[in-house]
Amino acid sequence: MDPNADVLRGLRITSLDDEDDDETELPNQPLPTTTATLAAAASGYDDEDEDEDEEAEVMLGFLEKPKHPGLLLRHLFPSKAGGIPAWLDPVNLPSGNSSCCGFCGEPLHFVLQIYAPIENNAAAFHRTLFMFMCPSMACLHRDQHEQWTRNQGNPRRSVRVFRCQLPRANAYYSSEPPSHNNSDKPLCAGAALCHWCGTWKGDKICGSCKKSRYCSEKHQALHWRSGHKNDCLQIINSSEASSSVLPAVGKVPARTSWLEYQIAIDDEVDLDSDGCDENSSKSLVMQKHGKPDDTMQSWMDQFEADADNRCWAYFQERISRAPEQVLRYCRDPNVKPLWALSAGRPSNADIPSCSYCKGPLCYEFQIMPQLLYYFGVRNEPDSLDWATIVVYTCQGSCDQNISYKEEFAWAQLYPTSISRP
């Protein structure tokens, strides 16, 4: 058992209805990082590992509405999904092509972030992983094709994951843990963000009012059409209007974001699967975006009829323990992801080395299709969808002179989407 597991359970976030609003909130939960007992294959089907898999420890993520929005501010080191990111390094944000889809060129949407410090790594006393994605399914199809090319030079991606880590003594946060009594504050302000998406650095300025900032020309145009045209005139005509017309940094409307949630962590081995039968597992896990779909049901029937497809059966059994899980986390070099399909999985040769230290990457976490249901993604033929997206990170969590280091994501799509070149 992971020595951090008991601590994590003690930090369990209460549900919205359990307690009164005035009660002190429990701190955000870091994910476990000392995983010596997790060498058994925890998440991929293999005949040799089946018995060991049953005993493996994997941490699961579930979505909860935060009791107070203040719980998700960056100086409280949250794990969260949707909304806008709580940047760990608030100044040196990813920029340029790193913030855009490699296919359509549009700014990426924030998916989630996981606070996952490494206990014995002083450089990663604070450590957060950030995932971003283009909302276009067409781009995800192209991304899935690109990941097979093994282009490590400058791959085009519609899914990007960044790792940011800081030592305990840093320029942004106190070296003491948050007190969670509303007195916690960051040590400095962050970079000015885009006034439309609230996600990326606003390095472009409105040419008229010289106040509004944007990450891209598209977001500037969207903001202009949505009302900034009138606001801009007010700012120009009255310097006092600027403070009331423009939102404060950190309170950007984020019109392009998905619904915001806090991520609560639980241990898979502590969950009882008896309360979830096979049918509820199907409805919550593999029905597209949480609702029945004729195409998806046909696909399910096809695979259920195939007695040899043990990969799917194993995936279904593991998910049935907690059908509402949106995240699976286990950072150990020997642990494998939980794949839904036998097709569309990478070989060892498909996983690149770390782009910075050239060391090996290891599986750290994966997101599940139920996340789309919580984000309110519509069940339409061209809507965003996946079987799972698996993230591999630097095994040594190297500390190079870059604030946000890009890691590697592998998208496994449903059978009608899989196309290997």
Image (cartoon, rainbow, N blue to C red):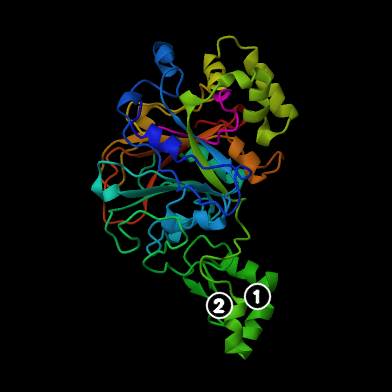
Q: CA distance from mark 1 to mark 2?
A: 10 Å
- How many residues crowd mark 1 within 10 Å: few (<14), some (14–19), many (20+)? many
Query: What residue sits 71% from the left and 39% below the top?
Result: 379
Q: Amino acid at mark 2?
A: Cys
When asked about the image quadrant of residue 96, the answer is: bottom left
Numbered disc 2: secondary structure: loop
Mark 1 secondary-structure assignment: helix
The secondary structure that dominates the magenta segment is loop
Residue 2 in the image, given as x and y percentages of width and height? 35, 29
The residue lying toward the viewer, choosing from 397 and 217, is 397
Marks 1 and 2: CB-CB under 8 Å? Answer: yes
Q: Is residue 39 in view from this perspective?
A: yes
Quadrant of res 288: top right
Residue 165 placement (x, y as % from top left): 33, 51
Q: Is residue 328 magenta?
A: yes
Q: Residue at x 40, y 43 (%)?
A: 30
Q: Residues within 10 Å of mark 2 (few under 14, many from 20)?
A: some
Residue in front for this viewpoint, 66 or 142: 66
The residue lying at 59 percent from left, 87 percent from top is 240
Taking 184 as reference, is 315 above or below it? Answer: above
- Decide: is 134 above or below 42: below
**Segment tinted magenta in the rendering:** 319-330
Which residue appears farthest toward the bottom when viewing the image? 237
Q: Is residue 36 shown above or below 192?
A: above
Q: Is residue 409 magenta?
A: no
Which residue is labeled 2 in the image?
A: 206
Please name the amino acid that badge 1 sits on: His
Seen from the viewer's position, the closer of residues 181 and 242 is: 181
246 versus 168 height, above or below? below
The tag earlier along the polypeptide, 1 or 2, is 2
Q: Which residue is mark 1?
A: 228
